[in-house]
Image (spheres, helix red, strand yellow):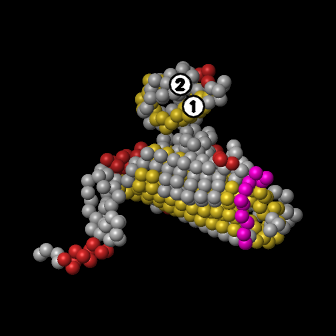
Amino acid sequence: MKPSILALTLIWAAAAPGQRPEVTRPRQTSGDQRVQPQWQEGLRLTVGNRDADLVGADQRVLQAAVDMLANLGGGEVCIKAGTYRLRNAVHLRSGVHLRGEGEATRLIKEPSITVALEEDSDWYDQEITLADASGFRVGDGVCLRARDPVTGRQTVLKRTLVARSGSRFKLDKALRENLWTIHGANCSSSFALLDGEFVEDVRIENLSLDGNRGQNAELDGNYAGGIFLQDCNRVQMRRLWVRNYPGDGISWQISHDVLVEDCVLENHRNLALHPGSGSQRPIIRRNVLRGSDIGLFFCWGVKYGLAQDNQIEGNRVGISIGHRDTDNLVTGNAVAASKAQGLLFRPERGASFAGHRNRIIGNRFLNNAGHGNAVVEVQGGTQDILIANNEFAEQRRGVRTQAVKIGPEAKAIALEGNRSTGAVQLPEP
């Protein structure tokens, strides 16, 4: 039966004039990644130390599950309770989700070893020769580094050892950089526990990750972390326990629409959470960020982000905002016991580099900064900042602090409705 003219008119009227009609009956169409049905069941693999689809106790079994599902178009890897000791990163793949059984699912980084290169490798090579190869195995993840003593330029490369003859190792990818002994070239078994590059639509949930900080060399958040993302989209991380990484807890660079929610990040050498260069629209909500150098570090050009209802305590700096980090909202957070500032706007290279148009609303700052110092400090040419309805409290005996300090180059810093208790001084209205 053909639809009546009246029925067609009602369908057409449902769409606003000049707008595309809403998708009301989605179908899975080849190549369409935006609209598809909500399937009731998908591909699923269990991984465990025993009694699972795939059985093992290191990164190889986890990677096998991830790659198998990726080759079939995506699915969920369910990692059963147990301990998995990693000699290389688990490399994430688009559309493949990781779900553990909470803190009982433990991914632990094995201790790192750092040795010098015995021979030079040029940029076109795909092998290295180590001065002492006794601690390395085929399959290991490594970080290769060198520094030009004249220019100060540092080379940092992440690779996997895929074959060996004695102390010579083949790499999974060519170097494309020079690694020369005169530049102190070395090899370290350092890597992120979970590493994603150019992946999208991934969920990571209910896992415990331990970076084994006391037995590992530092690797900073521009290259790794407990979890590291580079050029990714729409990655969601929920209910994770990320501890003890010798760098950053979770770092993402040029990665957009990243969600970190209901996670615990503790005792990292550098930054607990590092929304990194160029990352747009991050959501950082209801996390505990504790015992690191900086709790939440907005890196370069992080924009339109939300940091809400986080507990940020016992770090050197609670929250740091700087290089072109603009138009972010920081609200409802509890920032406590920061050794330096509870919130710092960094000075950067000048006004055009600073973090403008950020809103700091409804946060609670307790026992931050040292005697005579500022809890919130706005440095450099930072402009158009709203600091409103925040509570500043000081309960330490004999300690007096200043709630907000505005540097001489800062402009249009609005202070509204803030209040204080204890020995913390609000700025004059």
Alpha-carbon neighbours of circle 1 within 10 Å: few (<14), some, or many (≥20)? some
Which is more N-terminal, label 2 or label 1?
1
Q: Mark 1–mark 2 contact, CB under 8 Å?
A: yes
Which residue occupies 57% across, 52% down? 302
Residue name at image x 21 percent, y 79 percent: 6
The disc label shown at residue 155, or none: 1
Q: Residue at x 78, y 63 (%)?
A: 403
Residue 413: percent from left, percent from top = 72, 60
Q: Quadrant of residue 118?
A: top right
Q: Is 370 situated above or below 219?
A: below
Viewer-closest of 47 and 206: 206
Q: On the image, which quarter does residue 149 sit in?
A: top right
Q: Is residue 401 above or below residue 380?
A: below
Q: Quadrant of the N terminus?
A: bottom left
The furthest residue to the right: 398
Callout 1 secondary element: strand
Q: Residue 409 in magenta?
A: yes
> 117 left or right of 337?
left
Please name the amino acid that badge 1 sits on. Answer: Thr
* Quarter in which the C terminus is drawn: bottom right
**What is the residue that sits farthest to the left in this orientation?**
1
Considering the numbered disc 2 on the image, is that residue within a helix, a strand or a loop? loop
In this view, 416 is above or below 182? below
Q: Is residue 107 magenta?
A: no
